[in-house]
Amino acid sequence: MNGIELRNVTKRYGSDPSAPLAVKGISFEVPQGTLTTILGPSGCGKTTTLRMIAGLESPSSGQILMDGRDVTTLGPAERNVSMMFQSYALFPHMNVIENVAYGLRMGGVAKAAAHTRAADALRGVGLVGFDERLPSELSGGQQQRVALARALVLEPAVLLFDEPLSNLDARLRREMREEIRAIQQRLKLTVAYVTHDQSEALAVSDQIIVMDHGVIAQLGAPQALYGRPQSEFVAGFMGEAMVFAAVAREGGSVALGPLQFMPRHPVAPGAVKVAVRPEAWRIGEGEALPATLRKASYLGSYYEYSFETALGPVFVVSGDLARPLAAGASTALGLGEHGVSVVAQAPGG
Ligand SMILES: Nc1ncnc2c1ncn2[C@@H]1O[C@H](COP(=O)(O)OP(=O)(O)O)[C@@H](O)[C@H]1O
Ligand SMILES: [Mg+2]
């Protein structure tokens, strides 16, 4: 196995054995040349996990392997890993080319050679003609590119990102995430990428690991996590979903009020919960749940509707711009093929 592998890794900060675990026995692989995001709410253990991969924190138990080699006890310098942080902390007194060449110079590369490689790295991230500028003379997006070039120029086997885009505005964030993904694919880098933003994770990942309170809630391809969440937590975290009480029948079908559907996985008969994405509802089609429109909002490329139904309020997103509904309208709702999942009960719920 190449790439990164964590085997049953735990982390407890400090020396008090009664202190809570920040990471509670997680195992996963980041296959070589692929990008895995670690996604989850603040405090769930993302940064701790990344810092253990970098060698900046040591696990309390478990093993970390890189390219099949046990690196658990090795320091950061012995791991061929580069990390890019949320605050990209360029050296303010050094110009762009010096910032990018710094790591090479520290590694003993001669100045001229280091500057040539730094210039190549800057070209690779699309920042040409700024070599002599100071960081204070650059926009946030340009500083981000310098930080990216500074990480890439070291040609690490593994590149780690900790919420690298959270200081940028929405448009720039989209542009930079596409760029990071393109560079990762072009150079076939092995990347672990921490974010709390589900759309960022969906956009860039080969694999997503959703963490919750120090454990892995679910792991898989973006389509699997969005389309087949296994828990209410993952359904809610991977995008909007409303969760309804439903009943699984003997024959395998699930009854959601007057609606029926066949779950993708066999479900034991009894009470279940069903998560429905707002785009999964079909308005005025199929088997029907009578619904009265309470509120309609036009958002340019789609409508948001709030219906009143026997199941309670139902939130629906509709791309049908040609036939908008007006508040007060009576219609019926059905379920589409995608975006309907039977999920595990939330703990305590
Ligand atoms: N240096 C530290 N010392 C003690 N506790 C820490 C330290 N760093 C993080 N923690 C705790 O570990 C848990 C996970 O933190 P962290 O990995 O930073 O989460 P995330 O990056 O997902 O927001 C949190 O409860 C946090 O308070
Ligand atoms: Mg963090």
Image (cartoon, rainbow, N blue to C red):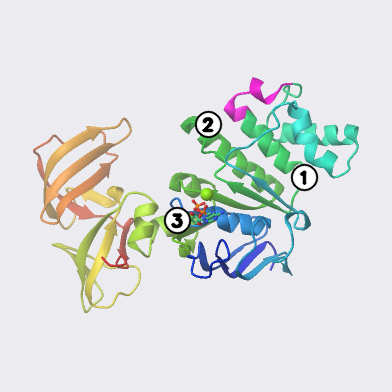
Query: Which mark is first along the chain, 2 or 1?
Result: 1
The residue lying at 48 percent from left, 49 percent from top is 202
For this view, does 172 lie left or right of residue 247?
right
Image depth: mark 1 or mark 3 in front: 1
The residue lying at 51 percent from left, 61 percent from top is 22
As shown in the figure, which amino acid type bears the numbered disc 2? Leu
- Whether the residue carrying mark 1 lies under 8 Å from ligand 2 is answered with no
Picture layout, residue 277 above or below residue 5 = above
Residue identifier under label 1: 154
Q: Is residue 279 magenta?
A: no
- Estimate how packed mark 2 is, as few (under 14), some (14 to 19) or many (20 or more) residues with alpha carbons within 10 Å: some
Residue 157: percent from the left, percent from the top?
A: 73, 54
Q: Nearer the viewer, residue 96 or 89?
A: 89
The residue lying at 74 percent from left, 50 percent from top is 156
C-alpha separation, residue under disc 1 versus residue under disc 2: 25 Å
- Whether the residue carrying mark 3 lies under 8 Å from ligand 1 is answered with no
Q: Is residue 135 magenta?
A: yes
Q: Nearer the viewer, residue 307 or 38?
A: 38
- Estimate how packed mark 1 is, as few (under 14), some (14 to 19) or many (20 or more) residues with alpha carbons within 10 Å: many
For this view, does 270 lie left or right of residue 74?
left
Q: Quadrant of the N terminus?
A: bottom right
Image depth: mark 1 or mark 2 in front: 1
Residue 65: percent from the left, percent from the top?
A: 68, 66
Q: From which residue to which does the magenta span run? A: 133-142
- Asked if the residue under mark 2 is in contact with the one under mark 1, i.e. CB atoms within 8 Å, the reply is no
Residue identifier under label 2: 172
C-alpha separation, residue under disc 3 versus residue under disc 2: 24 Å
Q: Secondary structure at mark 1?
A: loop
Q: Secondary structure at mark 3?
A: helix
